[in-house]
Image (cartoon, rainbow, N blue to C red):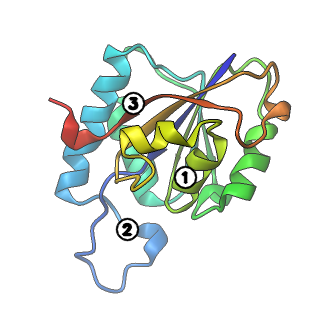
Amino acid sequence: MRELLLFRHAKSSWDEPGVPDHDRDLAPRGRKAAPKMGRLLAREELIPDLVLCSTATRARRTLELAAAELPRPVAVKQLASLYLAPPSLLLRILRRQPDAVMRLMIVGHNPGLHHLALALLADPEEASKTGLMEKFPTAALARIALPIAHWSELRPAQGRLLAFYRPRALA
């Protein structure tokens, strides 16, 4: 059994006209939500073995602020290919991950993460019950169990949604 954590970057800022999309930083709301999600990861003992993070500034800052709340450092690979990646590319990236990684996290973007989460679930009703079907908000985290022995075996409609966390719903 493997576990995938899909973590959408926190709310980004639109305050600096002319800044390329890739280089936008977090808005104040995002700077508040990212550490909150890091505390959730620590409290629930959801420390990933490996984090794959988009090279976009808002994704890197989200990870930096969340990881500062964890009890130990995590291994991180920054991948330019995660920037606005569609689900098909995200699946290819996931299938190439080492078997030593049992819990993997992606810090990335919508709509790719949202569509990937929905595609991975064996029971779409899970997404409806949690609100994931409608929306994958900024700084939200989907926790998906995958009944596979190797990442290379990952296919759509295999996963079970263990939890869907939104920062606004957390204390």
Residue 42, horizontal then vertical, whole percent: 35, 18
- To which residue does mark 1 refer? 113
Residue 142, horizontal then vertical, whole percent: 47, 37
- Nearest the viewer among 85 and 164 is 164
Q: CA distance from mark 3 to mark 2?
A: 20 Å
Is there CB contact under 8 Å for labels 3 and 2? no
Residue 70, horizontal then vertical, whole percent: 37, 21
- Nearest the viewer among 35 and 161 is 161
Q: Residue at x 43, y 44 (%)?
A: 128
SS class, disc 1: helix
Res. 141 in view: yes
Query: Residue 104, relative to residue 26: is it above or below?
Result: above
Q: Neighbour class for label 3 at 10 Å: few (<14), some, many (≥20)?
A: many
Q: Residue at x 45, y 19 (%)?
A: 46
Q: CA distance from mark 1 to mark 2?
A: 19 Å
Using the image, tell me which numbered label, if any, was put on residue 67.
3
Q: Neighbour class for label 1 at 10 Å: few (<14), some, many (≥20)?
A: many
Q: Could you tell me which quadrant the N terminus lies in?
A: top right
Q: Amino acid at mark 2?
A: Arg
Can you tell which of label 1 and label 3 is closer to the viewer?
1
Which of the marked residues, 1 or 3, is nearer the chain's N terminus? 3
Q: Residue at x 39, y 30 (%)?
A: 67
Q: CA distance from mark 1 to mark 3?
A: 20 Å
Res. 69 in view: no
Using the image, tell me which numbered label, if any, was put on residue 12.
none
Q: Amino acid at mark 1?
A: Leu
Q: Amino acid at mark 3?
A: Ala
Which of the marked residues, 1 or 2, is nearer the chain's N terminus? 2
- To which residue does mark 2 refer? 24
Rendered image quadrant of residue 66: top left
Query: Residue 65, relative to residue 40: is it above or below?
Result: below
